[in-house]
């Protein structure tokens, strides 16, 4: 059975790597073949049948989910709908975000998916009301929707896959008029759970008003992690304790154990209550098992049903059922049954890092045989030794997975977890749960104590995270390297008596000594990221790297550097930048500069930013962009063609007019990065640098605005490819239709990052071009 379940899961995994879904007729043939193979009752045939069933199951779920789609013709159309608030609302910059379950569509001819994600912005000048909507309310709303779309870049979060997993088939916003609350609460089970989560969050936030780690306490009680700021996440990730800042399997098990113990103690002593002899009609062991499973279920529901919590609940439920029916089951069977249920309920769970880390940690513990306490010594010594061995095994066992998923391993993790696991699990979490359930007068000191204890822990974690040795980074390993590291890990964690277990560490070497891929001398590579409505490009030579612009700021504390650029650089194993060029101060170009400077070592900042700009103050070294600057790296020439030094004295000049214009060339190939220059600056370049504008690739000035890309300028540059870094359905309507037509009329190939994803250009004897949405196409992209 265990092998069949693993084959089923592998079949589902295979399906999630497909660019297209198999046709329904193909699925029917696959199911028929699986039935025939299963009838043979041979292990290879059974495994193949299980894999076919897993792929077919995931494909059928995908067909059903994708069928509920918003037609392209309905994008951007105002529609009136009736439905219920179907999630815990989240405060955002200037409004509230929530999921909405559509019950009726009032606009004639409109087609709306059953579940959508909406943002409701406050009116200009009004403060956002975090309680504007509550879970379970029924509303009539005027909305404007678009199909699911996310930025597509290597080594970053796939937002479109996440929306598909959540059953959200359109996103949009609420229009300012025609919105009416129809009912205060629609009493459905899911709504009641979300209403309870909202009430607990409101209670905790009120008692911890102004406290830095209030978001952590909320996460430990209801699993809502969105109030934790990114700097704190950076500390948790560098110290390897991010799994604790949520409702993890450890917390669910602890609470279920407490519930089972309390019921067992009460049940066994019920004979002292007159007329009550509960153990006579139900054994205390069965009552405790049932209570533990119910407590775990309630806690998992409050957690938002995340994969680690799901896995723990299913395992506890299987153990409880075995106890109830008097059966004996092995832990490996329990783990595999939980694995099967998770994939059956959610075939897209295999796309998340939490799925692999959660099941991987338990699998490592089972493989290392750490379910048995060591012989000898007192009880507390045995427990302490077992805990140390468990931490040792999990730390080693998850190293290859951590490198594959995050391209880094926390060296401070074992020490940080040794302190954080008992503090968070045995002190902070119980206090947080107790404080959440107590009324206001009693809750404040309890929640305050939980916050104080975690704050003291966080102070120590920050010291650990500040060390340059806290994290080991390397490029994300290729498949062969990952498999080799897994084999080495299995060797190191083999049972006692296995020969030379330490030798397994040698299999890790290829994973850690890998270097970022780099072009040959005299060549260069440019990656134009999909950052939405903004610019960010990485230029690489043999031994040097330059980042041109840092993308937009999306919301307070959220920008393209944190979401896209730093994860990409970590995934590539790039730990330093030789130069950062911030073309000008507009937030769609400089929005991520401060985050980037704080997240990676940057040798020099070149920009047109003013002296008071925070990024300029944070930089180690700053050089003002000026025409005439010129340098060479590894046979590649970099020329700054603008702005003119005199422009800095013109205080009324727009920031666009001071854009840093950079030309990169080598071996007869060139690319021109023109930032947001407009027609006047293009004319100036034609006067001052007409002979140096020629380039094979042009980063379209000002995202394809109607004020740029004049005919004379395009003729002088003569590109064969034009790159438009624009946001999906952006409000500026970039690139403008007339500009796009102008490029097309001149025979220039146009590539838009909102359609193609990240674009990679390799400049050598020939120009090689690839797009992320094409090289890593998945069936849900663009759907």
Image (cartoon, rainbow, N blue to C red):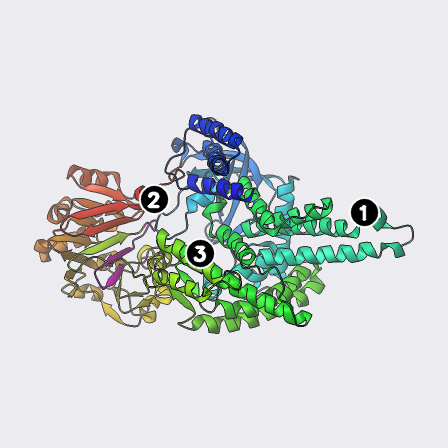
Label 2: which residue? 776
Could you tell me how far apart the alpha carbons at marks 2 and 1 are, in whole angstroms?
56 Å
- Is residue 207 shown above or below 533? below
Q: If you read the primary sequence from the N terminus, does the residue marked by circle 3 or circle 2 appear first?
A: 3
Magenta stretch bounds: 530-550
Residue 256 lies, in percent from the top left, at 67, 55
Depth check, mark 3 against mark 2: the one in front is 3
Which image quarter is the N terminus in? top right
Depth check, mark 2 against mark 1: the one in front is 1
Could you tell me how far apart the alpha carbons at marks 3 and 2 are, in whole angstroms?
21 Å
Classify residue 439 as left or right of residue 70. Answer: right
Residue 669 lies, in percent from the top left, at 13, 52
Mark yes or no: residue 554 visible. Answer: no
Location of residue 139 by image quarter? top right
Helix, strand or loop for disc 3 = helix
Question: CB of mark 2 within 8 Å of CB of mark 1?
Answer: no
Mark 2 surroundings: few (<14), some (14-19) or many (≥20) residues within 10 A: some
| Most common SS among magenta residues | loop
Label 1: which residue? 282
Instruction: Give me the disc on residue 401.
Output: 3
Q: If you read the primary sequence from the N terminus, does the residue marked by circle 3 or circle 1 appear first?
A: 1
């Amino acid at each position: 059975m265990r092998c069949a379940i693993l084959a089923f899961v592998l079949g589902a995994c295979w399906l999630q790597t497909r660019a297209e879904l198999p046709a329904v007729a193909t699925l029917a043939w696959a199911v028929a073949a699986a039935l025939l193979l299963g009838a043979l009752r041979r292990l290879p045939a059974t495994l193949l049948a299980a894999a076919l069933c897993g792929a077919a199951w995931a494909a059928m779920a995908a067909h059903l989910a994708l069928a509920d789609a918003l037609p392209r013709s309905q994008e951007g159309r105002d529609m009136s709908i009736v439905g219920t608030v179907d999630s815990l609302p989240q405060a955002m910059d200037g409004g509230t975000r929530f999921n909405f379950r559509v019950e009726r569509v009032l606009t004639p001819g409109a087609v709306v998916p059953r579940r959508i994600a909406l943002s409701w912005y406050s009116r200009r000048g009004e403060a956002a009301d975090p309680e504007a909507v509550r879970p379970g309310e029924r509303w009539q709303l005027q909305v404007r929707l678009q199909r699911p779309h996310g930025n597509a870049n290597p080594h970053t979060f796939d937002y479109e896959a996440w929306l598909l997993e959540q059953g959200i088939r359109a996103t949009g916003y609420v229009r300012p008029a025609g919105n009416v609350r129809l009912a205060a609460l629609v009493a459905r089970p899911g709504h009641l759970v979300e209403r309870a989560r909202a009430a607990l969050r409101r209670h905790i936030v009120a008692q911890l008003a102004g406290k830095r780690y209030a978001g952590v306490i909320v996460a430990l009680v209801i699993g809502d992690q969105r109030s934790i700021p990114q700097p704190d996440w950076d500390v948790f990730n560098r110290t390897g304790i991010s799994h604790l800042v949520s409702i993890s399997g450890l917390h669910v098990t602890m609470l279920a154990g407490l519930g089972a113990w309390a019921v067992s103690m009460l049940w066994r002593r019920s004979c002292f209550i007159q007329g009550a002899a509960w153990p006579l009609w139900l054994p205390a062991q069965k009552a405790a098992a049932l209570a533990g499973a119910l407590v775990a279920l309630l806690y998992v529901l409050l957690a938002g049903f995340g994969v680690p919590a799901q896995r723990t609940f299913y395992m506890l439920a299987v153990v409880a059922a075995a106890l109830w029916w008097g059966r004996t089951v092995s832990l490996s069977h329990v783990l595999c049954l939980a694995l099967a249920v998770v994939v059956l309920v959610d075939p897209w769970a295999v796309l998340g890092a939490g799925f692999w880390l959660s099941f991987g940690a338990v699998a490592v513990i089972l493989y290392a045989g750490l379910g048995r306490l060591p012989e000898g010594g007192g009880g507390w010594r045995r427990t302490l030794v077992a805990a140390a061995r468990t931490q040792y095994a999990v730390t080693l066992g998850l190293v290859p997975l951590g490198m594959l998923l995050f391209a880094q391993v926390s060296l401070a993790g074992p020490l940080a977890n040794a302190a954080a696991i008992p503090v968070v699990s045995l002190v902070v979490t119980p206090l947080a749960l107790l404080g959440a359930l107590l009324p206001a007068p009693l809750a404040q000191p309890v929640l305050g104590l939980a916050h104080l204890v975690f704050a003291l822990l966080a102070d120590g974690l920050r010291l650990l995270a500040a060390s340059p040795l806290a994290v080991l980074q390397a490029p994300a390993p290729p498949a062969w390297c990952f498999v080799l590291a897994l084999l080495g890990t299995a060797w190191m964690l083999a049972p006692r008596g296995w020969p030379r277990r330490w030798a397994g560490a040698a299999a890790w070497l290829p994973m850690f000594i890998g270097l970022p891929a780099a072009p040959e001398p005299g060549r260069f590579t440019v990656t134009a990221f999909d950052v939405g409505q903004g610019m960010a490009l990485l230029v690489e030579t043999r031994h040097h790297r330059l980042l041109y612009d840092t993308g937009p700021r999306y919301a307070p504390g959220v920008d393209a550097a944190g979401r896209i650029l730093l994860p990409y650089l970590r995934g590539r194993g790039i730990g330093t930048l030789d130069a950062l060029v911030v073309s000008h101060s507009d937030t769609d170009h400089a929005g991520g500069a401060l985050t980037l400077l704080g997240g990676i070592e940057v040798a020099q900042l070149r920009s047109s930013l003013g002296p008071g700009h925070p990024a300029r103050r944070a930089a180690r070294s700053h050089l003002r962009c000026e025409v005439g600057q010129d340098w060479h790296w590894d046979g590649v020439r970099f020329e700054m063609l603008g702005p003119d030094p005199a422009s800095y004295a013109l205080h009324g000049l727009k920031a666009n007019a001071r854009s840093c214009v950079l030309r990169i060339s080598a071996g007869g190939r060139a690319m021109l990065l023109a930032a947001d220059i407009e027609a006047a600056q293009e004319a100036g370049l034609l006067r001052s640098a007409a002979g140096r504008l020629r380039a094979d690739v042009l980063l379209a000035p000002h995202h394809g605005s109607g004020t740029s890309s004049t005919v004379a300028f395009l003729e002088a540059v003569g590109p064969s490819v034009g790159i438009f870094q624009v946001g999906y359905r952006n409000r500026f309507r970039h690139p403008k239709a007339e500009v796009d037509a102008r490029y097309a009329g001149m025979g220039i190939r146009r590539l838009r990052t909102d359609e193609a994803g990240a674009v990679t250009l390799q400049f050598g004897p020939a120009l090689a071009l690839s797009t992320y949405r094409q090289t890593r196409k998945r069936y849900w992209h663009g759907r």
